[in-house]
Image: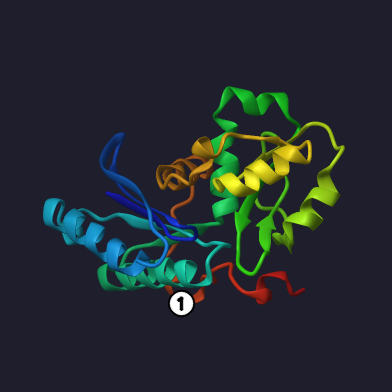
Amino acid sequence: MILALDSSTPWLGVAAVEGEKVLFQVVHYTRMEHSLLLLEYLRVIQDRFPLRERLEYILVGLGPGSFTGVKVGNMVAKGLAYAFRVPLLGFSVLELLASQVRRLHVASSFGIIVPVIFHRRGEIFWSEFPFPSTRLAAPPQVGSPEEFVARYAGKTGVLVVTPWEDLSEEFGKAGLSCLHPDLAVPNPLELVALSRERGERGSFENVFTMLPLYGSRVFER
């Protein structure tokens, strides 16, 4: 069984997959209760599908996004991987969204997919993915929505992907092409799809070495 979880944004996602069968899946909008709800969903999975006997590896969203949300998800994922002695692997939530959108027919009409994640204090994270690539080739960019609009206004072939309705509305008014926010909510099953597509399942060493993508350190080189 593969366990996938992401708490980088207000949309907490948890999924358990075995083979081609989805055993458990939930995407829950929450703002301040990531830790409480994540542990509750994990308890439900444990009650139904004993992890010690069935867990193969764990996937987690690395961020960027909410500092607390990213920290909670990565700490829980590392704790579980350590406790059950299974491999751990992480993907940026920007990669997750780029992969998720690539599967939509509308994406093929654009040359560049730009997932956007709200951070805090008027800041957003984003990264460019030349279609159909879903690999994070460079550290995420950070700035204000106004800076983002100034950068992309007038550019053709760019599809902006964000689950926040207010951001999507602001970008749309500026003339940017935006995917409908309902289609941009991070789905934990996409972590499983990325892992299988790339033939990666991580390693137990990631429990000690894998770094989440949060804070200004993400952008230091």
Image quadrant holding the C terminus, namely bottom right
Residue at 84%, 42% (x, y): give it.
153
Q: Is residue 30 above or below residue 178?
A: below
Count the labels in the image. 1
Q: Is residue 162 above or below residue 211?
A: above
Residue 6: x percent and y percent?
43, 57
Residue situated in front as seen by the camera: 103 or 84: 103
Residues packed near mark 1 inside 10 Å, few (<14), some (14 to 19) or many (20 plus): few
Residue 146: x percent and y percent?
78, 55
Residue 150: x percent and y percent?
85, 50
Q: Quadrant of residue 10?
A: bottom left
Q: Amino acid at mark 1?
A: Phe
Residue at 79%, 31% (x, y): give it.
157
Instruction: Indicate left or right for 144 with 192 as reference.
Output: right
Q: Quadrant of residue 176?
A: top right
Residue at 71%, 24% (x, y): give it.
109
Instruction: Indicate left or right for 210 with 117 as reference.
Output: left
Q: Is residue 34 above or below residue 149?
A: below
Instruction: Indicate left or right for 171 with 45 as reference.
Output: right
Which residue does the numbered mark 1 point to in the structure image?
A: 208
Residue that protrudes farthest toward the left in the picture: 47
Residue at 65%, 42% (x, y): give it.
169
Residue situated in front as seen by the camera: 176 or 194: 176
Q: Secondary structure at mark 1?
A: helix
Instruction: Indicate left or right for 74 with 211 as reference.
Output: left
Residue 24: x percent and y percent?
25, 44
Task: Give the colour scheme shown.
Answer: rainbow
Q: Quadrant of residue 187?
A: top left
